[in-house]
Image (cartoon, rainbow, N blue to C red):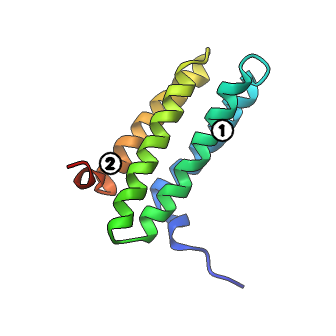
Amino acid sequence: MTERPAYKSHPLWETAMALVRDAYAVADGVRGLSPETARGLRKAAVAVPAHIAAAVSDPGEERRQHALAARGALAAVAAYAGKLPGEASRQLVRRAQTLELSVLFELDATEAVT
């Protein structure tokens, strides 16, 4: 039996996976109304935990790059969700923004901006 990767126990990754589930639910709800937005939302959402996993797993310079990529994907999730009607979309925007701040502070992505 293989061990569970350490990043799967990290709170940021767990939160990102919950965000993906919620993003897919929102996207499924508007797929008929706005298929391009739904597709973009799903694509941006799945990028978030992938980049967080890479950032958590890599202590070097790649960590910052993945943290910045995760923040960019979270901004895209918020932008796509912001185009959609409904309370679930508004909640998704807030959750993406909150997670983006957590990634910024916990993964120290600010140093790569300078």
Q: CA distance from mark 1 to mark 2?
A: 22 Å
What is the three-letter code of the residue carrying label 1? Arg
Task: Specify the farthest residue to the left.
Answer: 114
Density class for disc 1 (Cα within 10 Å; few <14, some 14-19, many ≥20) is many
Question: Which residue position is annotated with label 2?
Answer: 104
**Is 24 situated above or below 89?**
below
Quarter assignment of residue 59: bottom left
Q: Looking at the picture, how far across and down is residue 45, in whole percent?
A: 59, 42
Position of 82 with respect to 31 (left or right) is left
**Is 4 situated above or below 101?**
below
Residue at x 39% of width, y 54% of height: 67
Position of 17 with respect to 55 (left or right) is right
In the rendered picture of this protein, how many numbered marks are placed on residues? 2
Helix, strand or loop at mark 2: helix
> Earlier along the polypeptide chain: callout 1 or callout 2?
1
Residue at x 41% of width, y 34% of height: 97
Task: Give the number of the disc on residue 88.
Answer: none
Question: Which residue position is annotated with label 1?
Answer: 42
Task: Judge whether residue 8 can be spotted in this image.
Answer: yes
**Is 14 situated above or below 93?**
below
